[in-house]
Image: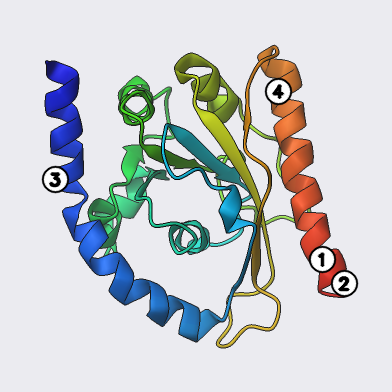
Amino acid sequence: PKVDRNMKKNKEKMIPYRLLNPILAPIFKLYYNPKVIGKENIPKEGPILIVGNHKHLYDQCLAIISTKRPIHYMAKKEYFDGKMAWFFKMVGCIPVDRSKKDDNATSKALEVLNQGFALGLFPEGTRNKTKEFLLPFKFGAVSMAKKTNATIVPFGITGDYKFRSKNLTIRFGKPYKVTKDLEQENKKLEEIVGNLMKENLKNSGK
């Protein structure tokens, strides 16, 4: 069947990810000294959407080092044109054209979830370079979760990406399913992510 072929192809494509992650993850941890809280909340199997706030290019790395499961990230297509293109391809990122409604990218993301894999998404849609605590969440995450019956695993990131950082933290919340209408679910997700960020700040003394 086509689904089995696609699943096999997906697993083969992620072999470089599985080989390099055990090498790169310890280097990342040693350099940035991140605190990872609640990683036991990430289900070990089944379709999951790992979803949180976006402040820095390396945010996806914090999620990646938190689980042995390969995470397919949706990333703006411009990342695939630069010097780091090899990295984004290697870690199974899905290029998204943000200048339009990119149905092709959405289709690939849904395929990842329908095959039982993990998808990473930043509902803010872009890095938050403003003074706002959080940018308004787009509906992609809750919509995909509802369509595929995937579990949402929320996270909140705070702190600075500095050498041996004293405050860089990623905190994962309890996994849950989307059951209500998308408007309610999107507000709920935004609130959960915001609360996880506040919990980090409270514990860091800020």
Seen in the picture, residue 151 relative to 122 is either above or below; the reply is above
Residue displayed at 48% across by 85% down: 31
x and y percentages locating residue 103 in the rendered image: 36, 20
Residue 185 badge = 4
Classify 146 as above or below 82: above
Residue at (54%, 47%) from the top-left corner?
42
Mark nearer the viewer, 1 or 3: 3
Q: Quadrant of residue 153?
A: top right
Circle nearer the N terminus (1, 2): 1
Check whether the beta carbons of the residues at disc 1 and disc 2 lie within 8 A of each other.
yes
- The residue under label 3 is 12
Q: How many marks?
A: 4
**Rendered-image quadrant of the C terminus:** bottom right
The residue beneath circle 1 is 201
Q: Which of pointers 3 and 4 indicates the residue nearer the eye? A: 3
Q: Which residue is mark 2?
A: 206
Q: Nearer the viewer, residue 206 or 7?
A: 7
Between 133 and 131, the residue placed more toward the observer is 133
